[in-house]
Image: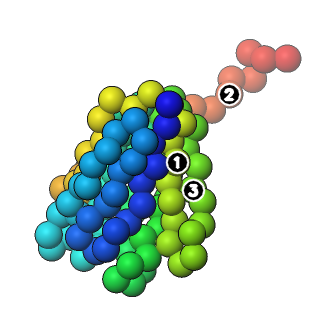
């Protein structure tokens, strides 16, 4: 059970494996978008030229996400049962701000 995602061109992402689809990179996204997966994985995708898409895992989900290099481009492999994959432009996504971690209280541990 796995899914692989690769950039086809600045306008499309190809999904293969448990899901077979071509997903459109939103127009006007300047080649940057967010990929969200049902297991909770969040990936940032950016085209460095017309045919080379690079991926960065922004949030780890339940599955195992691996990024493999294929020439100048990346291939993202998700090893997990994937129910759905969606794409949003970088300007149409929002994330919660991460706060500062709580301090450890003296004497509580140890």
What is the number of the mark on residue 77?
1
Q: Position of residue 56 (x, y in %)?
A: 49, 59
| Residues under numbered marks 3 and 2 in contact, where contact means CB atoms less than 8 Å apart | no
Residue found 39% across the figure and 48% down from its top: 16
Q: Earlier in the sequence, mark 3 or mark 1?
A: 3
Identify the colour scheme used.
rainbow
Residue found 54% across the figure and 36% down from its top: 79
- Badge 1 crowding class, 10 Å Cα cut-off, few under 14, some 14 to 19, many 20 or more, is many
Q: Is residue 47 above or below residue 50?
A: above
Q: Is residue 34 above or below residue 97?
A: below
Query: Looking at the rendering, which quadrant does residue 22 occupy?
Result: bottom left
Q: Earlier in the sequence, mark 3 or mark 2?
A: 3
Q: Position of residue 37 (x, y in %)?
A: 36, 39
Q: Earlier in the sequence, mark 1 or mark 2?
A: 1
Q: Is residue 109 above or below residue 75?
A: above
Residue identified by numbered label 2: 104
Tag 2, which secondary structure? loop
What is the number of the mark on residue 5?
none
What is the number of the mark on residue 67?
3
Q: Position of residue 83 (x, y in %)?
A: 33, 29
Q: Is residue 91 above or below residue 47?
A: above
69 or 59: nearer the viewer: 69
* Residue placed furthest toward the bottom: 49
As measured in the structure, the alpha-carbon distance from the residue carrying label 3 to the one carrying label 2 is 35 Å
Q: Position of residue 10 (x, y in %)?
A: 28, 74
Residue found 34% across the figure and 83% down from its top: 50
As measured in the structure, the alpha-carbon distance from the residue carrying label 1 to the one carrying label 2 is 37 Å
- Badge 2 crowding class, 10 Å Cα cut-off, few under 14, some 14 to 19, many 20 or more, is few
| Residues under numbered marks 3 and 1 in contact, where contact means CB atoms less than 8 Å apart | yes
- Badge 3 crowding class, 10 Å Cα cut-off, few under 14, some 14 to 19, many 20 or more, is some
Note whether residue 98 is visible.
Answer: no
Tag 3, which secondary structure? strand
């Amino acid at each position: 059970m796995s899914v692989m995602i690769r950039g086809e061109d600045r306008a499309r992402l190809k999904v293969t494996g448990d899901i077979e689809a071509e997903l459109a990179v939103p127009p006007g996204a300047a080649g940057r978008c967010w990929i969200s997966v049902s297991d909770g994985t969040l990936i940032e995708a950016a085209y460095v030229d017309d045919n080379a898409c690079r991926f960065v895992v922004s949030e780890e989900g339940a599955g195992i996400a691996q990024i493999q290099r294929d020439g100048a481009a990346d291939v993202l492999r998700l090893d997990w049962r994937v129910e759905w994959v969606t794409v949003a432009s970088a300007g149409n996504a929002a994330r919660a701000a991460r706060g500062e971690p709580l301090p450890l209280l003296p004497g509580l541990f140890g």
